[in-house]
Amino acid sequence: MSKTIAVLGSTGSIGRQTLAVARELGLAVAALTAKSSLDLLERQAREFLPELVVLYDMEAAAEMARRLRGLPIRVAYGMEGLTEAASLDRADTVVTAVVGMVGLRPTLAAIQKGKRIALANKETLVCAGELVMEEAKRCGAEIVPVDSEHSAIFQCLQGCRDRGEVKRLILTCSGGPFYGRSFAQLEGVTVEEALRHPNWSMGAKITVDSATLMNKGLECIEAMRLYRLPPEQVSVVIHRQSIVHSLVEFHDGAMLAQLGTPDMKLPIRYALTYPRRAPSPDEPLDLLRCPSLTFAPPDEEAFPCLSLALRCARTGGTACAVLNGANEAAVGRFLRGEIGFNDISRLVEKALDAIEVKWNPTLADILEADRQARSVVLDGACVLEESK
Ligand code: NAD
Ligand code: MG
């Protein structure tokens, strides 16, 4: 069980819920980090009095240092600051709740210090999962997933002594706000519509990923890495109610699932208290009042991001890093109103077709694949818009 945590990305959706759980469990906080949001981070710092506060942005860090003058809190900035926050001796657990590939180096730093990683930052495992998992094994660092599907699987696997008994993992998927629409019907959807998720309230990037189903594709790759299974043993089922958080099917025909209300505090709490369970102050799922549970296959034609991700999962090498980098850049452009919803999958496919895959990649190869993917998406802008 964790006693002192460092929270990377404490001002985001997962970060704020992590601090709510820390408050509830009486955990100490050694470090808090954010990109640039000063006011909330300042309030969090005054409440939890961490030894280190980090802002990615240098100017915001200088302003924070002024605001926190007189308190026993150091302020740092940039990737160096983020990495330091992940490596502090005092923290036994690092909650990786930043969004995007920017979480990779700090996660590796925390692993090298042998800390428990409460991992929300899925992009890290998608880009460099093999490397991250090998390093965790070498350093004896535990990785406990925060993503609800992976936490569900982690919980279902607790009694499993032999991974050879697992037939497949079944990740549930809400289907997002555009479930039931065709690819053509998705052409004109707006940013506002894409940000309206039916069941979860999350950061903007993951909400768009949930609308394109890229999120589920990234989660298939995340599951393959966490549980060391090939793509054929990971599948997806649409489950609109988000009550069954995922399942494990065993060779004897048994299926284990974890159910609960759609509330990220449960997987966060479990990642911090594992292998124990702490009581929750929230209302539990009421089986007699919950909606009927339905299951359906995903529509990969309407949501090509899912098949692109599965294609990369089968390819391996740097393909997943290209997928992720291109997707991060394309979602950024969609959120800025520069491209349409379906251009996200078009640009990701373009990057995958343009960039050569490297096998057995080093960290440098992964960072380079990410850079190239982003540049295809950012440079490709004019061409794509002209062709409309
Ligand atoms: P969010 O956008 O709400 O928060 C992101 C956090 O990261 C913020 O604190 C922000 O300041 C920080 N950040 C952003 N860019 C940064 C940068 N360049 N450098 C340093 N810090 C930066 O996102 P979120 O919804 O909390 O998601 C965080 C991660 O957790 C993502 O990887 C997401 O896929 C994963 N996740 C989220 C949920 C959820 O319910 N929100 C569920 C499962 C997994
Ligand atoms: Mg999830």
Image (spheres, rainbow, N blue to C red):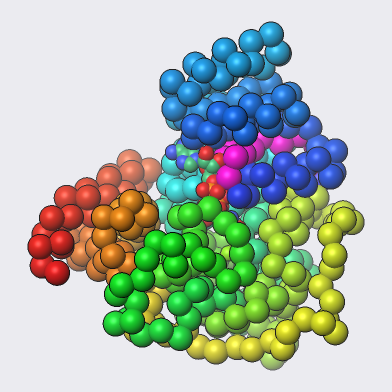
Q: Position of residue 298 (x, y in %)?
A: 47, 84
Question: Who is closer to the viewer here, 72 or 312?
Answer: 72
Q: Which residue is at 34% across, 77% downward?
A: 186
Instruction: Determine whether, in the image, residue 2 is placed left or right of residue 16.
Output: right
- Asked if residue 159 lies in the magenta stretch, the reply is no
Question: Who is closer to the viewer here, 147 or 10?
Answer: 10
Instruction: Determine whether, in the image, residue 267 is placed left or right of residue 231.
Output: right
Q: Is residue 133 visible?
A: no
Q: Which region is colored magenta? A: 2-12
Q: Is residue 386 visible?
A: yes
Question: Who is closer to the viewer here, 138 or 152?
Answer: 152
Which of the 4 image quadrants contains residue 52? top right
Q: Position of residue 41 (x, y in %)?
A: 61, 31
Q: Which residue is at 85% across, 38% downward?
A: 26
Which of the 4 image quadrants contains residue 66? top right
Q: Quadrant of the N terminus?
A: top right
Instruction: Determine whether, in the image, residue 51 is placed left or right of residue 223.
Output: right
Most extreme residue toward the top is 70
Q: Is 254 rendered above or below residue 226? A: below
Q: Which residue is at 14% across, 69% downward?
A: 388
Q: Is 47 rendered above or below residue 176? A: above
